[in-house]
Amino acid sequence: MERSPTCEATYQVILDGADRILARYGFRKMSMEDLAKEVRISRRTLYLHFKNKEDVGLSSIERTVSRVHDQLCAIANEDSAVTERLRKILRTRVMARIEATKPFHEGLDQLFEVVRPGYLARRQKMFERESEILAAVIEEGMRGGLFRSGSPLEAAEACLLATNAFLPYGLSVAELGRPDDIERRLHSMIELLIGGLTHP
């Protein structure tokens, strides 16, 4: 359902407040009352936008992913070499999430523990969107003879599965605290994937 500009602004302010509370206290200690106080609105107004705390957590995750998808679309439409766009898309889908969750990475385990059932139900749609973006770039590489022929969508899904291990929900708090290490290992995986696409 589309929100009015005023409702959308309030919705975003609430999620910004939730992110701040997550950074300070973690998800378990966050309450709807805390959130209402943080953003200086009534609890009634808060419940007009969110059903409960879990809904806030899921919406925070979805907002991060939506912003990442916007970045991926922009990269896919850049006027640069296919392999460079592919590298950039795979790097960005991971590192933009890492960067977005950096302020509250210590509370991510709590967040995913509570919202996991709802998240799993929505995750497939998130990954389908990323597959579409990636498949369009891979298909361009196949048409140009740069990548070996096959199903662009299957190749995209394989790339996503291979890099999923680097996403925040798949890493420990200690690992999330070392983004340079994540990026180094991710780079090696991306080069393997591109090598697999270019060589028969």
Image (tube, rainbow, N blue to C red):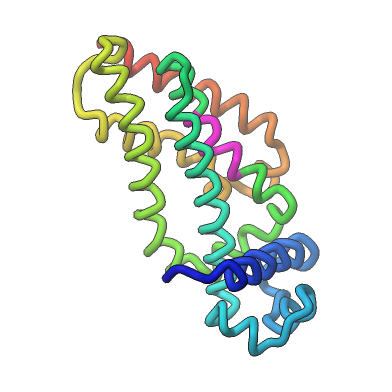
* Span highlighted in magenta in the image: 89-97
Q: Residue at x 64, y 81 (%)?
A: 46
Q: Main secondary structure of the magenta part?
A: helix
Regarding residue 190, the answer to whether it shows in the image is no
- Quick check: 114 above or below 60? below
Q: Residue at x 34, y 17 (%)?
A: 196
Residue toward you, 14 or 27: 14
Which quadrant: the N terminus? bottom left
Give percent across and percent down for residue 78: 48, 24
Report the number of discs.
Answer: 0
Q: Quadrant of residue 147?
A: top left
- Quick check: 7 above or below 181? below
Residue toward you, 181 or 150: 150
Q: Residue at x 38, y 14 (%)?
A: 195
Q: Quadrant of residue 82?
A: top left
In the visual, does 160 lie left or right of 107?
left
